[in-house]
Structure formats: structure tokens, C-alpha cells
Image (tube, rainbow, N blue to C red):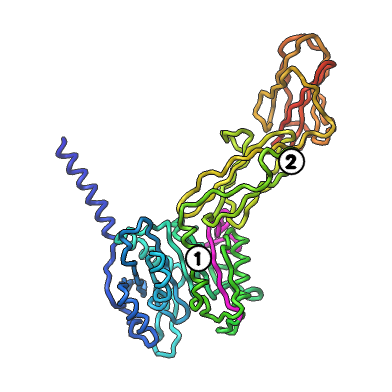
Amino acid sequence: MKSRSFFVICALVLLAYSRLSAQILPETTTDYLNIYKVSGHVAAYQACIQAGAKVINFPADTSFATVWVPPNYAAQAVKRVMVTIHGTKGSAYAAMNDEFANALANNYAVVGIQWWLQGATASADGSYLDEATIYHLIDTTLKHVKAKYSADLSRVGYTGFSRGSAASYVIMFYDRYRKTNYFALSISCSGGIPPPPGTPKPPLGEILQKRYGGIPLVGMPFSGTSFFYYCGLKDEEWGTTMCDQISYADSLMKANGAQTVRRISDPNGLHAGYRTNTGYQASAAQWFLDLTSTPKPPALTQPADKAVSQPLATTVQWATTASAAIYDVQVSANSGFTTTLVRDSLISANATSKQLSGLAAGTSYYWRVRSKNNVGASEWSETRNFTTQGMTGVTDNHAETELLVVAPNPLTDQTAVRFSLTKREHAMLKLYNTLGQEVASLLDAELEAGEHSWSFVIRHSPLVDGAYFLRLQTPTFSHTKPIQVTR
């Protein structure tokens, strides 16, 4: 029996190893498309190979990828990767060569994807792979880098130049739609979306209408994505004003759930201005490092802790955190957050506030926020407390009797209240709105001393959803209880 278990374990280990090995692809030093021989790309190719880069050929996809890891990559505790996508008639070699300085300074690996296919003649423009194929090649190459070099695929960035930048929007959508969630940041340089009357090319136009493949999308299509944009105000490379396109892309991405970490409109910038400015590159690299680090909890700003008389539509606010892609917000009527009134995990990092509605008057609430990115979630922030404003014109006179709402609060169907009297008294139980106006009389009777309960139906009442006050009153005391009606 023991020997059989041993062989089963060995078989499982071998199966796991074979699956891992299957992701490790052959690496060579030349591409079968012969892009490395094309005039204008020879120097970039030679620089890549001299730096230790390798080539992975993908004949079935009419493409190849380049892979480079820094000399001390194996010793790094955190193994990041930057994917680079070239521009018009460009090459994976040129895109990778542009990234070497930042990669060496910050110890991350670089993957380049070839998506331009050389034309039949030197003057021919050739053709380009579509975004679905690009993403397939990215996915395959990243799995190879993970299997061979132990790269952390939750810490990946994307740099797209020109046409590669224009492809970045669909690539980021695929990354979230397919739930691979590789990319913590897209550095989109000199390639935007043509503003009206232009029309985004498929499938981007459909995605921006929150559909894909004819099927409605659930949620915001770019939620959790982060963009760093560059454009030059003197960029007229293609007869367009590129900053107009970048500005339009920025607005569309934010409207669909993405966050913008920085947008540079370089007053003296040309088409390749990002690659000639080390300061811009350092800024983008720092954002990449921040968004691929364990996130830090945000600092809460408004309302102040223990604030009182807050409106029933209170807005909570917090400070932005560089390492956040989205925020979690929790609001509860108890400090342990065992039940929550608000639990929102889909707030873009562009948003640093949340308006709370449906709050009950005269009630204390607790709230907290945490940051999230590809790496994970931060600790929760401090917990703050605030109390909403009381009901207008209605006060208690230090009642000695507790008025207990037996059913869950908020109320949806039928509820019951419980209270006790120390002596025979005339008791009235009434419902008020937040303006102190009586909306229902539930009880008006002489009652004996002792425990009492009273039920009433919410379902068929004319009450609208919202905050109310339930008030018990006798000649000797009154007691008010805030309730919430939600049907």
C-alpha cells in the first residue's frame, strides 16, 4: 500500500513538472521572420543580443517575442516584468532597446512582442496582428517567463508606443475581461483614440458601449486598470494632433472605470518625446513600481472622527494612495463590521469619495477604506465614526423604558416592537418622518403595567423607502427609535 502511494505521488509530481516544462519555450538568437536583417532594425537587434536578450519564435502566429532578464534577476525577491509593444513598422528589438535603461535601474525583466509583419518590398507597409493575437502572444510569453525565470505575473506593466499605444486600450480590456489581470499599469505613449467625428476601431467601439461580441458587459469594462499617458504638443507625425487623441482616450477610459495616474502633455514634445526624456521615463517607472508593490491603506479625511449632526446623505472621503488601483469601502452600524450598510469594492482609484444614502437619522455609523491592486489588498485604514442628524422637532425626555424593534432594521415586510411600562398608563406609538411630521399612528390605548408588544405591516403601507422615527409616548416619558424602511 505504501509503495502504491509512493508511485501515485511520483506520478503527480511528474505530471506537474511536465505541465510546467511545457510552458518553457525554446529560446534562440534570431527570428524566423528575418526582421533582425531589416535595415533600420539591425542595430537594435545587435544591442539586444549583446545585452543577453533571447528570441522565441511563434511560426503558427506569424510572430516572435524577445525576452530579457537583468543579470541579478534570480536573486530578486520581487520579479517584475514589462511588456513592450512597438509602433508603426517597428520591431520588438527597438521597443526592448528603449526599455533597457529603466529595466536595469529597477531590476525588472522585459518582453517584446513583434506584431508588424514586413511587406513584400522594402516600401510596403506590411500588416499588423490584431489585439486578440497580440494578447495571446503576451499570455504565452509571460507564462514562459514565469516558468523559466520565476517571474511574478501579478507585477506586470505594459509600454505601448504610437500604434502600440493605440492598441493598449483593447489589450487592457482583454486583460480584465479574461481575468488574467497581468497588467498593473499601461504606459500609453503617443497613441490615443480619435475624438468625434472619428470612430474607434473594432472591437474598441463596441467595448466602450459596454458590449463585447454582441453580449452586454457586466460592470465597468476598464475597472481596476491604470494608465500613464504621454503626448507631445508638437507631435504631428501622422497629420494629427496627438494630445487631442490622448485627452479623449483619457476621458473615455476614466468614464469606463480606469484610473489615470499621470497625463503628460509635453509643450515641446515630438512623437517619440517620451523616449528622449529620462524624467518622464523615471516617473512612469516609479508608478509601475508603486502599483506592483503591496498597497498601503489610505488616510481618511472627511468627515472627522466622531462628527455629529451629519446629513442623511453623507459623503465619506479619503486621500489618494499611489499604490492603489481600486478602493474597498465599508460602512456599518457597528464597530466590528459584522453587518455592513455599504460594501463597495468597485471604486476606481480616480474616486476618493463615496456618497452614502439611506442613512437613518440620529444613528451612529462606522466606516473604513482599504487600497487594492494586482498584488493584493492593504490593511484597513483607521475606523472612523459619525452620527447623523436627529429628527426635527422631536426629542426624548430621558425615557426609562427601552423601545425594542424586534424585526431586522431596515424593515421590509412586517415588524414588531416591544416595550414595558412600570405602571398603568395611556400609551401612544407613532411614526414620524425626518422632518418631525407624523406619518402613522400605530397605537393609542390605555395599557397595564408590564411587557407589551405591537406588530404592524410595512408591506402594504403607503410609506416610501427612507429613514423614519418610531416614538413611544406616555404622560410620564417618551422614547424614540430610528428605523429604516426598504422594500
Residue 269 lies, in percent from the top left, at 57, 80
Question: Nearest the camera: 288 or 449?
Answer: 288
Q: Is residue 407 left or right of residue 94?
A: right
Looking at the image, tell me whether mark 1 or mark 2 is earlier in sequence order: 1
Instruction: Give the Cα distance between marks 1 and 2.
Output: 40 Å
Please give the name of the residue rendered at 81% of the width and 27% of the height, measured from the top-left corner: 395
Residue 84 lies, in percent from the top left, at 43, 71
Q: Which range of residues does the magenta coloring cover?
A: 205-233
Q: Which residue is mark 1?
A: 186
Please give the name of the residue rendered at 47% of the width and 50% of the height, measured from the top-left corner: 376
Asked whether disc 1 touches disc 2, contact meaning CB atoms under 8 Å apart, the reply is no
Q: Is residue 211 magenta?
A: yes
- Give the crowd class for mark 2: few <14, some 14-19, many >=20 residues within 10 Å: some
Q: Amino acid at mark 2?
A: Gln
Which of the 4 image quarters holds residue 262? Answer: bottom right
Q: Quadrant of the N terminus?
A: top left
Callout count: 2
Q: Which residue is mark 2?
A: 310
Q: From this viewpoint, is residue 487 visible?
A: no
Label 1 residue SS? strand
Label 2 residue SS? strand
Q: Amino acid at mark 1?
A: Ser
